[in-house]
Amino acid sequence: MKKSLIALAVITATSGAMAQSSVQLFGRLDVGYSNNTVKVDGVKNYSNSGANTVGNSQQGINSSQLNTQFWGIRGTEDLGGGLKAMFMLQSNFNTDTGGSQTDLFNREAWLGLSGGFGTIKLGRNYTAYDTVFGATNHTFNSNINVSTAVFDVGIANYTLRNSNSIRYEAPTINGFNAAVSYGFGENKTASTSATDTLSLAVWYSNGPILAAFGHQNQEISATVDREHTLLGGGYDFGTFRLVGSVQRTKESDRKDRDFQIGVNVPLGNFAVAFGYADGRTKAGGVTRNSDGYALVGTYNLSKRTTAYVGYERSEVEGTASTVSTTKTSNFAVGLRHTF
Amino acid sequence: MKKSLIALAVITATSGAMAQSSVQLFGRLDVGYSNNTVKVDGVKNYSNSGANTVGNSQQGINSSQLNTQFWGIRGTEDLGGGLKAMFMLQSNFNTDTGGSQTDLFNREAWLGLSGGFGTIKLGRNYTAYDTVFGATNHTFNSNINVSTAVFDVGIANYTLRNSNSIRYEAPTINGFNAAVSYGFGENKTASTSATDTLSLAVWYSNGPILAAFGHQNQEISATVDREHTLLGGGYDFGTFRLVGSVQRTKESDRKDRDFQIGVNVPLGNFAVAFGYADGRTKAGGVTRNSDGYALVGTYNLSKRTTAYVGYERSEVEGTASTVSTTKTSNFAVGLRHTF
Amino acid sequence: MKKSLIALAVITATSGAMAQSSVQLFGRLDVGYSNNTVKVDGVKNYSNSGANTVGNSQQGINSSQLNTQFWGIRGTEDLGGGLKAMFMLQSNFNTDTGGSQTDLFNREAWLGLSGGFGTIKLGRNYTAYDTVFGATNHTFNSNINVSTAVFDVGIANYTLRNSNSIRYEAPTINGFNAAVSYGFGENKTASTSATDTLSLAVWYSNGPILAAFGHQNQEISATVDREHTLLGGGYDFGTFRLVGSVQRTKESDRKDRDFQIGVNVPLGNFAVAFGYADGRTKAGGVTRNSDGYALVGTYNLSKRTTAYVGYERSEVEGTASTVSTTKTSNFAVGLRHTF
């Protein structure tokens, strides 16, 4: 008996027109060297724990630099008549420490049905809003971007994922797509209703054109809503591709306006991407600004393995609660591998 | 190189009379909509966290409704001469949140040998008692049953699994089966012995007939034992199947008496099951009663995928320590998938 | 569609001169009965939790007796031109309880490149020192050894693994090998540098001969270093094999000197191994001694499954902070299985 090995070729147990059933063990690793510098009002900051955290000036071997990491099990079963059962169990980890989340499948966990009516997924889902935010974000939605650092300094980032949620994805019709997700909250009390999250997205994708709209309403408490609205798009000119989006956010008396643009230039196995983001948060007559840029170069050693080098820099005038000016820079070089 | 994929066909690396060696990645998901209502002395209760918990009135997307969920790795190796090595590593999770246990293979973890003498499993095992309890429980031992809610209101439920344990399963002889498990406890001190757990089960299974007996003695402390004794059985009439059991429980001066019955009617890919449970706990001259019923309908979309709808309702007069009357009802609809 | 099953035969998706790409699910279990006795100044000790812990007198079903346990996912991808991408995700667990670590891939987590230049691994790596310590340790580096109990009573054991680290393994040239690992620490503050760990190893392995040297410098704080230095080797006489090593350790004003020797006698599927270890810790003019021996017998039921029986006994005059004499003995019998 030889050593156990996961077969790497697609076993077509069923052939012809019938869709295949499969169970896959899959994942992604991303690790390399990084050097982070954070200055608060000109003074170097070391207060936050973990060199991966923006807020700590450290150098070393870090992970999730180009992309976040995961391993998981997913499957598809053909039920006949165009109906499919699908599941996803996906777990975060960091290659630099071996660290993981308390909830093993915190990243994604759902069971669903897919057919002519579209796809329904029950469990822990990405919100619909996240789908269009990611698709229109600069530097290919890599972690070497500045949207997160620059956008979330006033009102907190939208919830990317909802536990106890249902997600519906409509079938594509003439390039038009739509998704909606609803998280139940499940924290109803005798006097307050559950703090649910409703998220929707519509997008048009046809040849070089992408146009996208998203809206998410997340109840923070019985009386406070956090609302995110995004308008974005992209165009592929062949030699390069442009993306961009504008986001408006509301929570209590605070209002934020954010925008970002990016360009991606493929050069065979090489690619270069640049992104710029600009944020503004306003409340009680006080406005604070933030901006930053990111530059990434990638080289595909194979379809599954990519070497990268990147640099990002951001400046934040102050958050909802602080007035310090924080300047952050991050240099990263590393390797990404999928299986 | 194509995408990695776990082969779905049984690879018979060895053929003929020799038993096969294999390693399997396997699992089960179960998620859907549920609506729970809990009333304590007529007042709706929201105090417990988690909508899955009986004790909390919530609606939403919940998991483990028809069955608990897991993923795992298991294997069998043929050692020749009728001897086999076997292992099991099984991990709980919830599809609705992606949540898991602190101990990864908390559900089952054992390594064993199997041969003409039976099977020995060393590690974290289900107790022998649990085997016969499950086999004779109503509504197919699905989670949409009322045994747990109704049976454990006085003396706590038996320990389902023992860490640091040995489990022996005898070979089947003329329909007779036996299993015994022993958990060492491993908490001996200078003045007290380890609080061990001894569990045994015998059952006769032949054609339509099932008759079962189980006993479990769990040391709670150096001076207190928790004893569970069960007599149960079933009969398959062809068009429907009946199961039932009586359980007697003792701990200190408390004595409980529980019984339950169930019927299962298969109708092609459909099946309907009904169960009723009744419990009584007695100590210091005070008796408290509990009862409930459950109704489940299932439809097999395939061998691996089942849609279900269920309803359960229970009423508990009081527990060992409280005198409130708690009425619980739970409606669930969802999907179960195995891989 | 049959039940999902991980193919057990090596699927050579690519053939000929080209190296294969693969993803493997793999692991090891080790569980059995053990009886530990610990006497501190003649009095039986039960204070430590967990029967696996040296320091607690318990009997029961325990794991990691012959070897530690793990499951993991690892892969190799041929990138052409002699270059390979490699990854490792490896997770500890215990079969006796199903227990695991908070950081899932705490055991090993790295992504690397391999080629004519050697191998570079980024992430959570074993230190270079650990490689030569393990290779020259008695009783095959099994857990039934007394090096750990006897060696680490003064200065603490060396760090086996470094998060946020880089490990380089040179190509073998005429039997000469070298490895170096560096852990960044990543805990720099405004006034102190990061507490890094530098570890190196060189060894010569040719036919029956093994000669090895290792050194590890671990910064415990900004002012304290922990230094381990090892000289070891082995010789295979055919009917038996000898190994041995001397270790010198320094930390602040404390100096330790340790040595161990072992012999292994293979007898077909049987093997017998014996090891002896002796330690001495010195500080402030006070010297304390420790010694012990271990004896192991193994029988291979197959290439993947081994039955074992072992006994170890150690005596420690006192540690860096205590003067009690601790006598420990451990008897173990069990089964080890790899997949």
Image: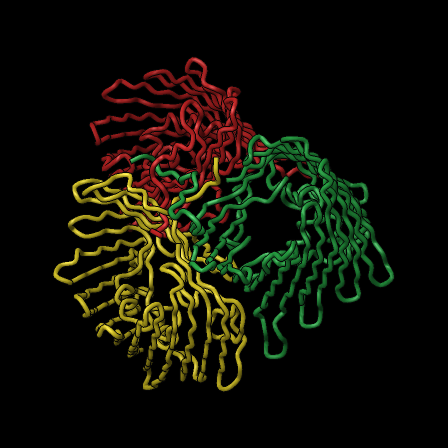
Chain colours: A red, B green, C yellow
Question: Does B175 sit above or below residue B330?
Answer: below
Question: At 38% from the left edge and 53% from the top edge, which residue is drawn?
Answer: C90
Task: Work out which residue is located at the far right of the displayed protein and give it.
Answer: B285
**x, y percentage for residue A91?**
44, 43
Question: Does C297 sit above or below residue A261?
Answer: below
Closer to us: C188 or B120: B120
Question: At 38% from the left edge and 38% from the top edge, which residue is drawn?
Answer: B5
Closer to us: A242 or C42: C42
**x, y percentage for residue A212?**
42, 20
**x, y percentage for residue B198?**
64, 65
Question: Does B18 sit above or below residue C46?
Answer: above
Is residue C192 something one can see in this rendering? no
Position of C146 compared to C255: left or right?
A: right
The quarter of the displayed image where residue C270 is located? bottom left
The quarter of the displayed image where residue B4 is located? top left
Question: Does B255 sit above or below residue A232?
Answer: below
Is residue A100 something one can see in this rendering? yes
Question: At 81% from the left edge and 44% from the top edge, which residue is drawn?
Answer: B41
Closer to us: B299 or B108: B299
Position of C74 compared to B168: left or right?
A: left
Total count of labels: 0
The quadrant of the picture occupied by the N terminus of chain B is top left
